[in-house]
Image: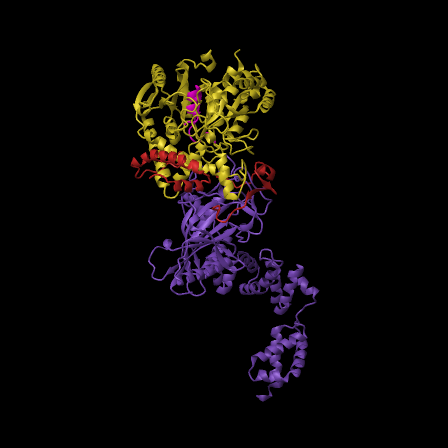
Chain colours: A purple, B yellow, C red
């Protein structure tokens, strides 16, 4: 895009809290039940009902706010946000308007180039989720009607509103990834974007270089309800380009809400300003203010688990390369797998290497996750111990690991069944080495003339003859010995 | 023994608990009374004769000991039809609820049942409790038992008329700006609005959430105390209900300082009303109490504040009637069309007027000038009372400036109609307890005397009013007067 | 500062109330009378006065996160005007016709 504009992005992230019950009633909050089976007079918005706050929802919200470096208000209040829609039973959502639960936090993002950067969090507030509409027909536009399921209505949400501090689609991706990692360590939500337990709206505007007005006055486009971090990034990328082209053509950017089409990678207009909502917020008369004591807030802070920044530091100080540490930190399950494995096996780096290469590959291929991997940390450690004791080679171990994933058997068992054992008998390997060298005089010459790669070829030939069971460093050693002893006539 | 339907709840319960009479006989007597009178009065929207008789027979199976332990056992009770019940339909006096049958009972209903009360029916009201005459019911107007050409007051007009006409000994009403006290005054019964938060609102169809309060309507103060005793108390389903707040101990002085706010005794008062009130005040003096003129300077602004706050909250509370999950649905067109047609056909004119007013008061650009300003005025009104109660124990006023008016007399002029609430709205705005008790008759129509007390002094207020009840002429009842 | 017909129609749309041309005039007259009446509040000096949003000065009680029985689908939907497969059926939602989230 043209360099005459700076990209300004702010994100609003909705996160469903992992409580047993809804925010204002005792109905179960679980996902996936039969439509309307988790409803009661309160979440159906029946006449005469009143809301009563769920303690655990407030606890999880405060936990999140503290982990995101926010100040938690000792007094916050609830307000009604009013609009008509069939998924909103009372025709108002109980939310927090001008005195939210928490404010003034931040998340640090680490762009590939350059220093870590703090992205401000303007506010975090608690609110209830809406129900779900199932449209009859292919799309909303040509549906003949919609079916309302209110199981989700009243499930507790927090909305995390960032400052407009993000300067690119890539930064938005980093912010969301980091935010999700932090929340995952807190265990406050399922964080499944595809199921809607984490949702993101992106506000995108372009600021002309030299513009000195308020950011609020720039025409802002809101991309609503994008269902993956990748798509948030794509949506912003598309939107930046679209707006830049409009500006280039001298067109005005209309403040509007746009959807994102996964198939085309484009955003499309949903609602223009003519229909701008007037939500008529006013303080919820049915709920007195929420009052939180400093002692209680402090006790929640004390109970926070280790968070990504501290974990990164700890990993690097244990000798894990920053790049690997990053991969582990961003996946809480991987980190927990790693923690369990390294507790029993002392070579942290070896565990890391195996996890991030072979284990990761197999988990992905099999559609598993670290928490539910067929080979857990104990299994991996047993395998690594077999390598360490010299019973099998690294190369053999890869094959063993695959078999372990497939059969669910332990490493030792697989090795025994396959009749694998590393050939450590020097005499046996020496005769194979001599045989291989006889067949490849030209390669020997290459090696002697300084081509190190030639040796690798010879090692490969020996391994092939031994069906991979020779101990590689021994093969290496013997090849060098024999070449120097029997072929080094040139010197 | 007098007719069963002529006895108050206290007496009925005693007779039943002592085994002298059966609950079935009590219920039958009241059903007969309803049968005979309600075609003239129109107090009820629904009478559950079968259910009440079944419940009565269940009550009759209890031992005398068990009857004694449950303070309302054997007593028929009617409910204003904005209190939801599982076994009777609930309409809120509106067409929009259609054939709605609540899947849950209001907390007060649970409490009444636990206390042994027998629910006999649901009473008429102005639609969603918006009105002061019960003419704004979507079904039919209710008539005043003292003069069937006149209104019973409202919005709890059905409950007031049912109690006054001896169709039921006690009923529950709800009071948002005077909706218990004003009809109590017009019908010559006792009506009490407790301190905000004393009685759970769970299951009361919300009109204005920050003002609504359920209370008893009875023919004696001892009955009001009995019913209040049963229905009040903290409720885990109502976040605004008061928890663990004991009744404060009132001054043990036998002589009180009673405040007479000069703003309530001005020119607008009907002469007949003034005469009755003056006599009551003399009686109070006769009891040794000191009458003190006080000022509640923001009284003049109360109606304006009330008519912003109540419609604003109502506009929000009534948004849920959208034809999706319950109630009536108008057919036709797309979703927007369905919403608008349903609400157009389902709501009456007064409800629409207030919903529009309230929506406007909350809309962008007007919130500060209207809703927020009104809530600040409310603070001023509370401060007025705080100050007054520094120097007086209770405040006494007429409940209304006039007696029951003729049907149709006020329907055309909203301001005139709203100004009728002038003496009652301040108690709702300040959250304090208030009650109206019959003080006598003016031109054959009842006149109510209003008592106000500091927040939480609900029990004390009932006791105080009862001391006056003891020395006043016993209130006759409509048929005696006419006979 | 009287409300115009357009203002009234805007408010009516927000409230999802349909007003016929016949109703509009009387409604406008009534609303403007009430608004003129309440405008007396503007005379008061309310500088620094805190609004009374809750008349009882208490704080929100917190409920334990323990599931309670739901109604069950049949009971939850028994009052529904149109119910299909245990869900409430609503007419089609036209683009922009309803202001949702």
Q: Is residue A1 magenta?
A: no
Q: Is residue B179 magenta?
A: yes
Asked if one can make out residue C54 in the rendered structure from this viewpoint, the answer is: no
Residue A281, horizontal then vertical, whole percent:
42, 42
Q: Would you identify the image quadrant in which residue B332 lies?
A: top right
The image shows residue B27, relative to residue A293, as above or below, that is above
Residue A251, horizontal then vertical, whole percent:
40, 59
Asked if one can make out residue A231 in the rendered structure from this viewpoint, the answer is: yes
Out of A403 and B154, give the one closest to the viewer.
B154
Of all residues, the one furthest to the bottom in this rendering is: A490
Q: Would you identify the image quadrant in which residue B441 lies?
A: top left
The image shows residue A168, relative to residue B287, as above or below, that is below
Residue A330, horizontal then vertical, whole percent:
51, 58
The image shows residue A317, relative to residue B289, as above or below, that is below
Residue C84, horizontal then vertical, whole percent:
60, 42
Of all residues, the one furthest to the front in this rendering is: C22
Out of B138 and C52, give the one closest to the viewer.
B138
Q: Total of numbered circles in the picture?
A: 0
Q: Which residues are magenta?
A: B178-200
């Amino acid at each position: 895009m043209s360099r005459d504009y700076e990209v300004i992005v702010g994100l609003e992230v909705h996160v469903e809290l992992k409580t047993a019950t809804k925010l204002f009633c005792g109905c179960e909050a679980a996902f996936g039940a039969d439509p309307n089976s988790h409803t009661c007079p309160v979440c159906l918005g029946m006449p005469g009902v009143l809301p009563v706050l769920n303690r655990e929802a407030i606890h999880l919200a405060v936990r999140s706010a503290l982990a995101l470096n926010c100040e938690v208000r000792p007094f916050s209040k609830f307000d009604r946000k009013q609009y008509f829609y069939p998924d909103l039973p009372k025709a108002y959502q109980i939310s927090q308007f001008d005195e939210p639960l928490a404010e003034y936090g931040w998340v640090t993002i680490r762009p590939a180039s350059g220093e870590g950067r703090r992205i401000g969090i303007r506010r975090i507030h608690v609110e209830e989720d809406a129900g779900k509409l199932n449209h009859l027909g292919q799309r909303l536009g040509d549906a003949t009607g919609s079916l309302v399921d209110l199981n989700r209505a009243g499930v507790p949400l927090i909305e995390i509103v960032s400052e407009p501090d993000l300067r690119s689609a890539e930064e938005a991706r980093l912010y969301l990834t980091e935010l999700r990692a932090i929340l995952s360590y807190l265990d406050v939500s399922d964080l499944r974007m595809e199921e809607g337990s984490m949702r993101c709206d992106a506000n995108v505007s372009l600021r002309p270089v030299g513009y000195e007005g308020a950011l609020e006055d720039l025409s802002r486009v809101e991309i609503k309800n994008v269902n993956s971090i990748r798509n948030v990034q794509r949506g912003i990328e598309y939107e930046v380009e679209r707006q830049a082209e409009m500006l280039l053509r001298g067109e005005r950017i209309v403040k509007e809400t746009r959807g994102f089409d996964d198939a085309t990678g484009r955003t499309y207009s949903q609602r223009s300003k003519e229909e701008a909502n007037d939500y008529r917020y006013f303080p919820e008369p049915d709920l007195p203010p929420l009052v939180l004591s400093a002692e209680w807030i402090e006790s929640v802070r004390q109970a926070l688990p280790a968070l990504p920044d501290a974990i990164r530091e700890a990993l690097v100080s244990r000798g894990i390369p920053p790049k690997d540490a990053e991969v582990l930190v961003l996946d809480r399950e991987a980190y927990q797998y790693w923690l369990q494995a390294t507790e029993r096996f002392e070579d942290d780096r070896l565990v890391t290497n195996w996890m991030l290469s072979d284990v990761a590959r197999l988990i992905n291929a099999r559609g598993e996750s670290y928490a539910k991997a067929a080979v857990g940390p104990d299994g991996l450690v047993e395998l690594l111990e077999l390598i360490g004791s010299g019973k099998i080679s690294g190369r053999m171990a890869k094959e063993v690991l695959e078999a372990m994933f497939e059969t669910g058997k332990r490493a030792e068992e697989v090795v025994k069944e396959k009749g694998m054992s590393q050939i450590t008998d020097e005499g046996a390997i020496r005769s194979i080495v001599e045989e291989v060298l006889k067949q490849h005089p030209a390669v020997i010459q290459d090696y002697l003339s300084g081509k190190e790669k030639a040796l690798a070829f010879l090692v490969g030939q020996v391994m092939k003859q031994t069906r991979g069971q020779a101990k590689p460093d021994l093969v290496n050693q013997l090849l060098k010995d024999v070449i120097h002893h029997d072929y080094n006539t040139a010197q | 023994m007098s007719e069963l339907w002529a006895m108050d709840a206290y007496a009925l319960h005693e007779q039943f608990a002592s085994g002298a009479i059966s609950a079935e006989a009590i219920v039958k007597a009241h059903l007969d009374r309803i049968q005979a009178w309600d075609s003239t009065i129109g107090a009820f929207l629904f009478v559950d004769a079968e259910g009440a008789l079944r419940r009565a027979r269940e009550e009759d199976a209890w031992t005398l000991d068990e009857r004694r332990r449950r303070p309302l056992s054997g007593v028929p009770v009617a409910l204003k039809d904005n209190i939801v019940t599982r076994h009777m339909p609930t309409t809120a006096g509106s067409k929009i609820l259609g054939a709605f049958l609540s899947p849950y009972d209001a907390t007060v209903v649970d409490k009444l049942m636990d206390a042994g009360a027998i629910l006999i029916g649901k009473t008429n009201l102005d639609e969603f409790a918006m009105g002061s005459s019960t003419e704004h019911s979507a079904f039919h107007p209710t008539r005043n038992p003292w003069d069937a050409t006149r209104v019973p007051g409202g919005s709890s007009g059905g409950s007031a008329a049912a109690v006054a006409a001896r169709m039921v000994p006690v009923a529950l009403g709800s009071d948002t700006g005077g909706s218990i006290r004003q009809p109590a005054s017009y019908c010559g019964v006792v009506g009490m609005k407790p301190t905000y938060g004393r009685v759970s609102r769970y299951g009361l169809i919300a009109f204005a959430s920050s003002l609504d309060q359920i209370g008893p309507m009875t023919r004696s103060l001892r009955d009001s105390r009995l019913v209040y005793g049963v229905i009040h108390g903290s409720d885990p389903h109502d976040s605004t209900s008061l928890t663990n707040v004991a009744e404060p101990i009132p001054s043990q002085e036998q002589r009180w300082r009673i405040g007479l706010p000069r703003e309530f005794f001005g020119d607008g008062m009907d002469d007949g009303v003034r005469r009755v009130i003056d006599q009551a005040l003399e009686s109070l003096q006769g009891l040794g109490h000191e009458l003190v003129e006080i000022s509640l300077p923001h009284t003049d602004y109360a109606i304006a504040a009330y008519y912003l706050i109540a419609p604003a909250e109502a506009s929000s509370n009534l948004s849920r009637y959208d034809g999706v999950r319950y109630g009536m649905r108008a057919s036709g067109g797309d979703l927007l069309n369905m919403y608008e047609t349903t609400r157009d056909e389902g709501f009456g004119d007064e409800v629409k007027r207030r919903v529009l007013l309230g929506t406007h008061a909350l809309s962008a650009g007007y919130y500060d000038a209207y809703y927020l300003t009104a809530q600040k005025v409310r603070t001023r009104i509370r401060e007025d009372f705080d100050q007054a109660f520094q120097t007086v124990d209770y405040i006494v006023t007429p409940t209304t400036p006039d007696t029951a008016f003729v049907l149709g007399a006020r329907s055309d002029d909203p301001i005139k109609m709203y100004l009728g609430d002038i003496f009652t709205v301040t108690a709702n705005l300040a959250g304090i307890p208030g009650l109206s008790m019959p003080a006598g008759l003016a031109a054959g129509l009842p006149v109510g005397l209003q008592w106000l007390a500091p927040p939480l002094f609900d029990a004390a207020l009932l006791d105080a009013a009862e001391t006056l009840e003891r020395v006043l002429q016993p209130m006759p009842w409509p048929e005696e007067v006419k006979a | 500062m009287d409300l115009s017909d357009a203002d009234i129609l805007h408010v009516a749309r927000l409230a999802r109330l349909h007003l016929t041309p016949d109703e509009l005039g009387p409604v406008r007259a009534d609303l403007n009378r009430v608004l003129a009446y309440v405008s007396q509040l503007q005379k008061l000096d309310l500088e620094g006065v805190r609004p009374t949003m809750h008349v009882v000065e208490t704080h929100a009680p917190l409920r334990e996160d323990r599931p309670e029985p739901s109604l069950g689908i049949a009971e939850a939907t028994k009052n529904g005007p149109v119910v299909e497969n245990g869900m409430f059926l609503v007419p089609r939602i036209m683009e922009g016709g309803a202001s949702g989230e």
